Amino acid sequence: MKNLVEEKDGKLYYNGYCLVDLAKKFGTPLTITFLDIIKERILSLKEAFENAKKATNYSGDFIYLNANKANYGKDEIESAFIFADGLETSSFYDLVLSLKMYEKYPLFHDKLIVCNGLKQDDYLDAVVMAHNIGYNIITIIDDIYEYEYLKKKGPRLKIGLRVHLSSLYEPEVPDDRFGLMPEEIEYILNDVKNTNLVLNTVHYHQRGFDFEEEKFFKNFDIAFNYYIKARKMYDTVTYFDFGGGTPLPIEGGFDYEAYAKSILTHIQELCKNNNVAIPNLISENGKYSQKDSTVNIYKVVGTKNTGEYPWYIVDSSLLIALPEMYALGEPMLIKPINNLNEKMVKARLAGITCDCDDVYFDKSKGYFEIPDKDDDYIALLGTGSYQNSMNGKGGVHHCMLPEEKDVIIYYKNGVELVKVRKELQTIEDIYSILNIKH
Ligand SMILES: Cc1ncc(COP(=O)(O)O)c(C=O)c1O
């Protein structure tokens, strides 16, 4: 994987761009998305699996899906769609948006659509409609209701079974509210032959970030046993979908080819021992595709001394920018980006909201190191996944702080293109959302 972060002449570079130069050019608070990182991520994982397939003589395909839920930006999904083998959706709305992408690119008509999430009638009806138009769509059954509903619809819809991972089976597996219980899977396996539905996939998803190999294969095996069982009953079962959670070690340096080889050889062994055919492998990549494509940049606009270390206050809100870190405790990279050759001070960062939780420092040390200057800027690296939906992009934010100016950078036919997608949110924008006339 390409190393994105570099330090040169006291400045931080990301994806080859000097971040403080971008901050000065566009102003802060600023969000910059490098769309080509999405492409690079997709192509490099596909290449790692292709190389691993050759090295292990793996006969199945590796299918890379973009998990749209990570970022609903049109440009982000489009960048992923062009290079991925298809899209993974998680709601009715997500499917409608995906179908728009398929309409825009008729050449990609056959790329796969995999539908996850708990499905109500609108979502299921949209699946049937997409199938009838001729899209290559698989509904992953998350609940018996979905199965019974689709059974009544008639067409030869392709379905998958989402396996519920539970601490009931493995104490270390966190309880997950999704998927089918063993008796429900048993019921579908015995019943599906009496229906028009075509069972072709076994699916599971586990959350992941840093790769924990032992835990990964423990969960993998629970789900794969269902593939073995289903495949023995139905030749139509040709896909094993291992969901998202593709490793994304925060400081880089992960060997994706070794990771791919370990998965493929593991499957080969399980299939050989159980005398079943090798499946095609589906991977649904949210964070891996999107996270590192975006950085947020803020300027330090003031300092305040109320404790052991001074507060360095930035011109927006860290709490709003990093919902994953505040709500879920996920690690994020936060770095000063200029004056890096200067003396450092121990400080703490704070956003400009009125919220006492809008602060950041290294919890183990109690401080954050920042240059001892009065024109410091900081960047949050890797804000491209889940932030937009979790912080309500386009909405009214904490203390009515304006949303960052939104810029995209990408290359077309070797030419760099820079577009301002949205200017810094204005008070008029905010009033109009709140329906306030002035
Ligand atoms: C079913 C499913 N697939 C894929 C993903 C994407 O996971 P990640 O962003 O870790 O790649 C998720 C995330 O919640 C999911 O629920």
Image (cartoon, rainbow, N blue to C red):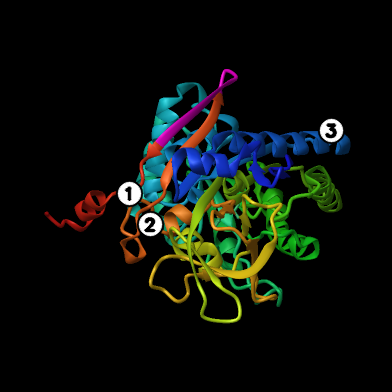
Residue 21 sits in quarter: top right
Q: Looking at the picture, which amino acid does disc 3 mark?
A: Lys
Q: Is residue 414 magenta?
A: yes
Residues at discs 1 and 2 in contact (Cβ within 8 Å): no
N-term-proximal mark, 1 vs 2:
2
The picture quadrant where one finds residue 257 is top right
Q: CA distance from mark 3 to mark 2?
A: 44 Å
> Which residues fall within the magenta stretch?
412-420
Residue 121 horizontal side relative to residue 62, left or right: left
The residue labelled by disc 3 is 54
Q: Which residue is mark 2?
A: 392
- Is label 1 or label 2 in front? 1
Q: Is residue 267 left or right of residue 231?
A: right
Label annotation for residue 425: 1
- Give the camera-side residue of 307 and 74: 307
Q: Is residue 104 above or below residue 176?
A: above
The answer to if 395 sits in the magenta stretch is: no
Task: Please provide percent x and percent y for residue 304.
Answer: 49, 72
- Chief SS of the magenta region: strand
**How many other residues sit within 10 Å of disc 1, few (<14), some (14-19) or many (≥20)?**
some
